[in-house]
Structures are given as structure tokens and as C-alpha cells.
Image: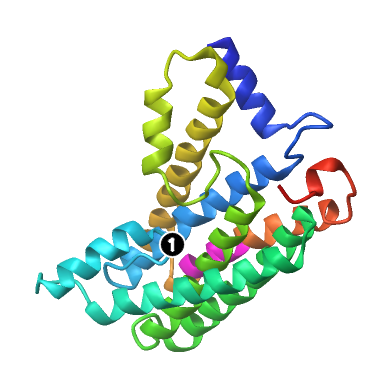
Amino acid sequence: MRAVLRGLRRTLLPAEGDRHGPLPPLLLGLTLVTGLVDAVSYLLLGRVFVANMTGNVVFLGFALAGAPGFSLAASATALGAFGFGALLGGRIVRVHRHRGRALLTGALTEAALLAAATLLTATGGVHHDRHAVIVAMGTAMGVQNAVVRGLGVPDLATNVLTTTITGLFADAGDASAAVKAARRLLSVLAMLSGAVAGTTVVLHAGHTAATALPLAGVIVITAATTYHARANAPWTRAV
């Protein structure tokens, strides 16, 4: 238990000289944003995920089989937008060999796309511009996940929790995996918190507020990353 607690502290407050520097807490922030985004997309855009592509592929299968309440066009649009965003994110990682700058560029791109989704919602409403909002949010999530993948921080993928939860329980009792367990636990809690917060805003505030919430989260992460993008420590080097 003490080892896990130390792992929690190391993840949230990385020590100077840590291999991944400040990246773990920043990626936990993006994991929370993922929960926010998918809560908003599922509840406001009609049974479609823009970050969780595993669920979205399943929804696509439901739609193809004719299950009511699932949209073939919406699921396909989300998949296409996510793929395009991942293409952009991969390019960002290849251009910026400095991990802090890669994260900053990815966060700025994601913020711009989420701002577009918020603007579309504020001016036309999510139902009028549904597919445009899906494209903007799906592309943002594709960028995020490709950049995070390129950063190479273990156990902090920001969107895939099936593997994370499997590892959390499969490695239970292994003292050498305490740091991994801490990161996995924090990832689950971050996404859960994002989903709860996103759902609360959807149910009790306007649609514009719901789409603006993940934007606010990314802006905070972008601001924090701006400082670290100027660093020249070992953690900044590509893995």
C-alpha cells in the first residue's frame, strides 16, 4: 500500500530528474478531458463517441445491424475525423522531437478544434450542426491521442482504459509494479471524474457550456505546458 501511495505522489508530483518530467500530471489532465468530451458527445450528439473509438466501432456495428437509436453517419463521421486528427498528431510528433513542444503544439491544435466545436454549438446548436461538431471534436481527440502515443509515457494513454484496468488487477500484489498501479488508478479516476463533470454540465447547464468545459480544460493544460516547452532537461528528448 505504501508503495502505491508513493507511486501516486510520484505521478502527481514528479521529482526533479524524473524520466518523464512533468508529463504524467499533464496527461492525467488530458484523460479527464477525454471523459468530459465523451460525456458531451454521447449525451448531446446522439450515442456517438468522439474519443473512445472502441465503443464507437461497436456503435457502428449496431447501426449497420439496424439497431434503433444509433446513427451510421455519426459513427462513421467520428471515426473519419478521429483518423484525420491522428494523422495530424503523428505529424506533430515527427516534427517536434522535443516532447514538451510536441505536447504544446498538440494541445494548441486541440484547443482550436474544441473552440470551433463550442462556437458551432453557440451559434447553431448541436442538433443543427451535429456532424460539424462531431468532426471538430473527433479531430481534436485524434490529435490528442496521437501526440500522447508519441510521447511514450507508460500507463497514461488518456483514452484506453480496458488495458489499463486489466493491468491494474492483473499486477495486483506485485510490489515492483506499484508506480504502474498508481498511474493506472489515477487514469481511471481522471476519466471517471471527467465523465461525471461532463454529464453534470450537460444535465444542468446549456449545451454551449457543456462543449466549452473540455475546451477550458485543454486551455489550462496548454498554459501549464507553455512553461515546460522551454525546458532542455533529459525528459524532453523523444523516447
Depicted 6 relative to depicted 53: above or below? above
- Amino acid bearing label 1: Ala
Left or right: 236 in relation to 151: right
Residue at (59% x, 44% y) in the render: 28
Depicted 96 relative to depicted 188: above or below? below
- What residue did someone put label 1 on? 51
Residue 121 at x, y percent in the picture: 46, 80
Residue 150 at x, y percent in the picture: 63, 55
Depicted 210 relative to depicted 225: above or below? below
| Mark 1 residue element | loop
Q: Depth check: give the residue in front, 198 or 112.
A: 112
Magenta segment: does it hold 197? Answer: no
Residue 221 at x, y percent in the picture: 69, 55
Depicted 125 relative to depicted 9: above or below? below
Q: Residues within 10 Å of mark 1 (few under 14, many from 20)?
A: many
Count of numbered badges drawn on the protein: 1
Residue at (42% x, 31% y) in the render: 167
Left or right: 63 in relation to 114: left
Residue 63 at x, y percent in the picture: 17, 73
Residue at (40% x, 64% y) in the render: 40
For the stretch drawn in magenta, the main secondary structure is helix
Instruction: Give, as a single range, the part of the protein colored magenta.
Output: 209-216
Query: Can you see residue 110?
Result: no
Query: Can you see residue 103?
Result: yes
Q: Quadrant of residue 172?
A: top left
Residue at (58% x, 54% y) in the render: 149
